[in-house]
Image (spheres, coloured by chain):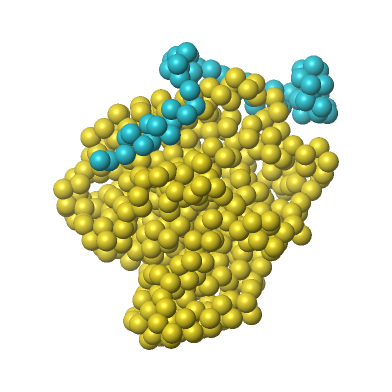
Amino acid sequence: MDEILKLQGLKYDAKRLAEIAAEVEVLNDAVRKAAEARLTFDDEPAAFASVMEREARK
Amino acid sequence: MRNDDIALWSLSEVADAIAARRISSVEATEACLARIEVWQPRVNAFLRLYKDKALAQAKAMDAELAAGKRRGPLHGVPMAHKDMYYRKGEISTGGSAIRKDWRAPVTATALEKLDAAGVVELGFLNMAEFAAGPTGHNVHHGHCRNPWDQSRVTGGSSSGSGASVAARLVYGALGSDTGGSIRLPAAACGVVGMKATYGRVSRAGAVARSWTLDHVGPLTRTIRDNARVLAAIAGHDPNDSTTSEKPVPDYEAALEGGVAGLTIGLALPKEGLVPLDPAIGAAVQAAADALGKLGARITPVTLPDFTALYRAAEVMVKCEAAAMHRPWMEKTPDLYANQVRTRMEAGFFIPATQYIDALRLRAHFVKEFLSTSMDSVDAVILPAIPFPLPTIEETDTEQKGGPAVLKMVAGFTGLTRPFNTLGLPALSVPCGFDKNGAPIGLQLVGRPFDESLLYRIGHAYQGATDFHQRVPT
């Protein structure tokens, strides 16, 4: 965590860092699990816009 | 017309009356100003009121009409907007202290389009600081208060938009929606709010909360009003590369199609991030019954587990907000409300790979939702806010804090934020009042770019109910 703080140029006390760590863990876990079940090498962010156009009612 | 007080007419009624020269734009503007004088001290909806400028603008609109020029279906109609739409050379606070004297270098595309349509601008409206907050609290400019009960929240972040439209101070207002910020104040204040499909309306010149999840849209008293404003602001914009080139339909022309033959999915989620209050569920069930009587086929649908969609949205918002706010967070952190600043801090610690995966997941989430919950229905209806409206004091995270308060505040967006991740059109329509007399919102969700169908359903529903015609006193 100290290294991340140095890289980001941030200053937080230990109590706040612990709170943030807990928050990030929840978010990371949720995204990682969703990604494991769905994402492949070929998925890219721009696919979203294509899907929206394609799935519109004809 | 059904009332002598012009301020109580709908946007469409007043626009049509101005066009027919039965009333003038100046008269409509004066009616709004008179009401603002009475209600502003109660609800704190306006951050800046442009009285003289609005009257001069209204006079110019009347002169144009007298000379045979009508700009469009909003000619001469007074509106005001969330204080995050840039007007070149004018102050635009974004609800913040940091930008309290900042002047915008450009005019937002949505405002340019409303200018071209002939709208009179009454001023700019209260909002959550930098559009971060679902309740309507603002420590810098004062909390916005619900016209139905001034001890209760307005919903946010477009708090002033919801309050001003509900109190009949303006005929319509622009809001913005990153996790529910149009639909929540619409639901809480008893008005109509549309978060159109991502890419339907340009975000250029609007303060960003999250470039990926922000949606620009109108709050109005009726569905017809909303359709008219959306038609004016929708469409491709070279200044916003995420806007779609799909043509904008004539939303008003499709309003009278009725609901006979449509299949509408009813979702009353019993489990999830926030439990559904039975009274709210009953109001939504009653709305479904009303649509059923109008000829729609109502069928229960199961929503997916929204947890992943919700968390993915949080990752996007936190990372993007942390990036854009970083200079201020480093130099002037004390100028933020605590809850606004602390909600962004996690964004500095989320790995870029997680953020990118959240973006990559969106296409999968949309395909899954459309092929499951929406597979055999034309639209889905569900509550906008899953519980009765709390008070300002109960949800004051700056003063109270603690897990219970934070959980309640987070709960506001439990049923709205997932549709920002999905980018689907979502509309909030008033469908009743809770045990405290505060409004309840019905949320309608459609396929991509299916705003016309949502308006059609909402219009049929408003034809059979009168919740949208009730006025706070």
Q: Quick one: B307 or B396, which is closer to the camera? A: B307
Q: Quick one: A3 or B237, which is closer to the camera? A: B237
Note whether B450 is above or below A46 in the view shown: below
Residue A50 x/y as whole percent? 40, 32
| Quadrant of the rendering where the N terminus of chain B is positioned | bottom left
Residue B274 x/y as whole percent? 48, 37
Residue depicted at 50% across the width and 32% down the height = B310
| Left or right: B460, with B8 as reference point | left
Residue depicted at 69% across the width and 34% down the height = B323
Residue B338 in sight in this render: yes
Residue B424 x/y as whole percent? 40, 41
Q: Colour of chain A?
A: cyan
| Left or right: B36, with B387 as reference point | right
| Left or right: B276, with B185 as reference point | left
Note whether B121 is above or below B396 in the view shown: below
Which image quadrant for residue B317? top right
Residue depicted at 75% across the width and 46% down the height = B336
Q: Colour of chain B?
A: yellow
